[in-house]
Image (cartoon, rainbow, N blue to C red):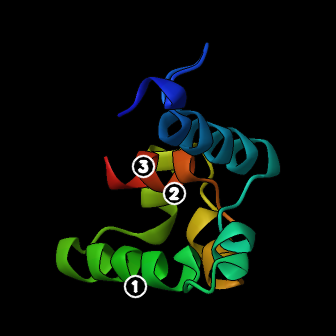
């Protein structure tokens, strides 16, 4: 990187990525940002992951929701189209 890209917060790339992360965290969803960029939303793909976890493990949806997010209705809300934040996605994946 050239010295002209450096600033108080690091490179322009790192500052931009951090700004996007903060915006997404503040607004609770990344799907709006992805739509602006012409990218597919996170929720449908993530719902597929959750459905696969439920099918493979035999875990009840309320148990998964409670253990992963503290919300036993999480899977039902996800199926209904609730918007997610990246922190929630990462929590469920973990």
Residue 48 - label: 1
Q: Residue shown at 29%/81% (left/top)? A: 52
Q: Is residue 56 above or below residue 22?
A: below
Q: Nearer the viewer, residue 68 or 15?
A: 15
Q: CA distance from mark 2 to mark 3?
A: 13 Å
Which numbered tag is attached to residue 65?
2
The N terminus: image quadrant = top left
Q: Label 3: which residue? A: 90
Q: Position of residue 19 (x, y in %)?
A: 67, 39
Query: Residue 41: horizontal and vertical position, in percent?
Result: 59, 81
Residue 89 image label: none
Residue 94 horizontal side relative to residue 32, left or right: left
The disc, 3 or 1, on the residue closer to the chain's N-terminal end is: 1
Residue 26 image offset from top left, x and y in percent? 79, 42
User: Residue drawn at (58%, 43%), measured in percent from left and top?
Assistant: 70
Secondary element type, mark 2:
helix
């Amino acid at each position: 990187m050239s010295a002209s890209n450096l600033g108080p917060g690091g490179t322009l790339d790192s500052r931009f990525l951090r700004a996007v992360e903060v915006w997404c965290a503040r607004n609770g969803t990344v799907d709006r940002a992805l739509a602006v960029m012409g990218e597919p939303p996170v929720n449908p793909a993530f719902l597929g992951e959750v459905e696969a976890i439920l099918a493979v493990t035999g875990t009840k949806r309320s148990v998964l929701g409670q253990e992963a997010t503290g919300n036993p209705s999480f899977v039902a809300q996800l199926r209904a189209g609730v918007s997610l934040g990246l922190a929630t996605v990462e929590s469920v994946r973990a």
